[in-house]
Amino acid sequence: VQLQASGGGLVQAGGSLRLSCAASGRTFSTYAMSWFRQAPGKERDFVAGINWSGTSTYYADSVKGRFTISRDNAKSTVWAYLQINNLEPADTTVYYCAATKGRIGPTGPYDYWGQGTLVTVSS
């Protein structure tokens, strides 16, 4: 079972990134997927979530309008994406993807976690 997050990097403020999460080893097409972020010394914060079919999405108030979550269940490896536009220095942190059979949101609980991908936004 593996969730592999990728797509992070160094970008200038105002730029865009698309984070990807490859989920394999389970029938992840039946799991809701979410993205979290965690700055050093702080709690992990829920950013966005999407239900198993992709028909419902949820966002933290702080990212609405700039972040878009989507997914692709077409293949055995399920992909979850987080499109981030108009990046701000405050978005600098590690982003994690997670999968749950339970409730989408900050508490989950989440069954599987990816290893994180670092986003750095320069001003």
Image (cartoon, rainbow, N blue to C red):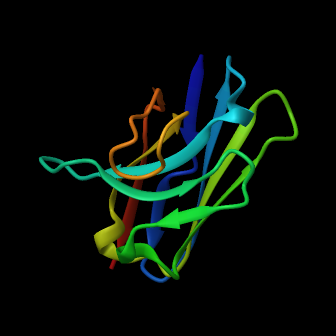
Q: Pick out the residue farthest to the front.
A: 103
Which residue corresponds to the image point at 18% horizontal and 48% vertical from the top-left? 40
Q: Position of residue 67 (x, y in %)?
A: 53, 71
Front residue (pair 105, 21): 105
- Vertical placement of residue 98 versus 39, above or below: above
Front residue (pair 39, 80): 80
Front residue (pair 22, 111): 111
Q: Position of residue 6 (x, y in %)?
A: 57, 43
**Residue 18 lies in what quarter of the image?**
bottom right
Which residue corresponds to the image point at 72% horizontal and 24% vertical from the top-left? 27
Front residue (pair 43, 16): 43
- Vertical placement of residue 4 versus 2, above or below: below
Image quadrant holding the C terminus, namely: bottom left
Q: Pick out the residue farthest to the left.
A: 41
- Vertical placement of residue 44 versus 61, above or below: above
Which residue corresponds to the image point at 43% horizontal and 34% vertical from the top-left? 110
